[in-house]
Amino acid sequence: MATQLKPRMECSDAEWEARQDLAACYRIFDLLGWSESIYNHISVKVPGEDNAFLINPFGLLYDEVTASNLVKIDIDGNVLSGNYPVNKAGFTQHAYFHRHLDWAHAICHTHTTEAMAVSSHKGGLLPISFYACNFQGQIGYHDFEGVTVREEEGERLLANLGQKRVLMLRNHGPVVLGRTLPEMFVQAWALQRACEIQVATLAQGEPVTVPQDVIDVHQRDLGQVSLPGGPGAADFAAWKRKIDRIDPSWRE
């Protein structure tokens, strides 16, 4: 028998679609083992509302997030809708990027063991795997200043990101930004794979590194293996089908 979902909350069709995609993303992150108890964050801008974004309810596990219990806040931290508090560390960091980067529709910050290990390595992400080559020259680095709850740190976060779409917080973990949620997701997935491979490779001893001229060719040709729909669209759709088979309650 098909699962009966609750009626959708009152909001625009565009916002409801964004809510469902973001709730799906939380469930996918959890399935992949990227959640961190009730902490860390994924956010998306509300379509058609430049100063509002959606973020997870502080206190819920990722597998408890649904489309309707996501919290809608403005970039000044005011709750526009939702019945849960918001983690200040998530609001401060994400709001600064959403405020100042008009292209940053989706943002995630994770604390996976492998990504935190790479962020704590002096050399950062090294060119020692297929996936790592995707990111060479494409990552900004920001020195650890403590938990990100002070707005004035935002200026330095933005400066260290520059024109890139990944910011590795030293001794902390990555922030991945995307023009769309699927783009952000596939970048986070590839970065996580690169970090997993680096940790495993360095455990064996001295790695073989890829020379810069090969990295340049690799990055030039990546677009030739993309599917229609934009970066990450097919990947994200596939994972949504998987979590639907497991538990479709994220749609509520």
Image (cartoon, rainbow, N blue to C red):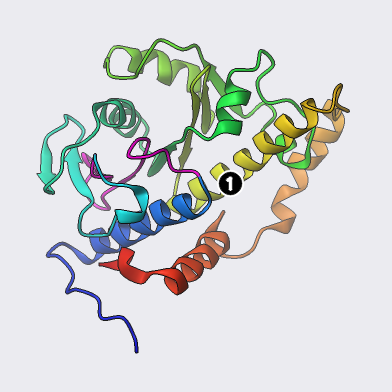
Depth check: give the residue in front, 64 or 153: 64
Q: Residue at x 15, y 65 (%)?
A: 9
Q: Residue at x 51, y 68 (%)?
A: 242
Q: Amino acid at mark 1?
A: Trp
Q: Looking at this rendering, what residue extends furthest in the bottom direction?
A: 1
Which residue is disc 1 drawn over? 189
12 to 164, vertically: above or below: below
125 to 187, vertically: above or below: above
Which quarter of the figure has residue 93? top left
Residue range corresponding to the magenta coloring:
34-58
Where is residue 186? Give x, y as percent: 56, 50
Left or right of residue 176, residue 49 in this image:
left
In terms of secondary structure, where does tag 1 sit?
A: helix
Where is residue 92? Give x, y as percent: 27, 25
Q: Quadrant of the C terminus?
A: bottom left
Q: Quadrant of the N terminus?
A: bottom left
Query: Can residue 167 be found in the magenta stretch?
Result: no
Left or right of residue 169, residue 130 in this image:
right
123 to 219, vertically: above or below: above
Where is residue 137? Give x, y as percent: 67, 26
Left or right of residue 145, residue 115 in this image:
right
Depth check: give the residue in front, 44 or 246: 246
Q: Residues within 10 Å of mark 1 (few under 14, many from 20)?
A: some
195 to 202, vertically: above or below: below
Most common secondary structure along the magenta stretch: loop
Which quarter of the figure has residue 25? bottom left
Q: Residue at x 41, y 10 (%)?
A: 145
Q: Residue at x 56, y 64 (%)?
A: 234
Where is residue 79? Give x, y as percent: 12, 40
Depth check: give the residue in front, 77 or 45: 77
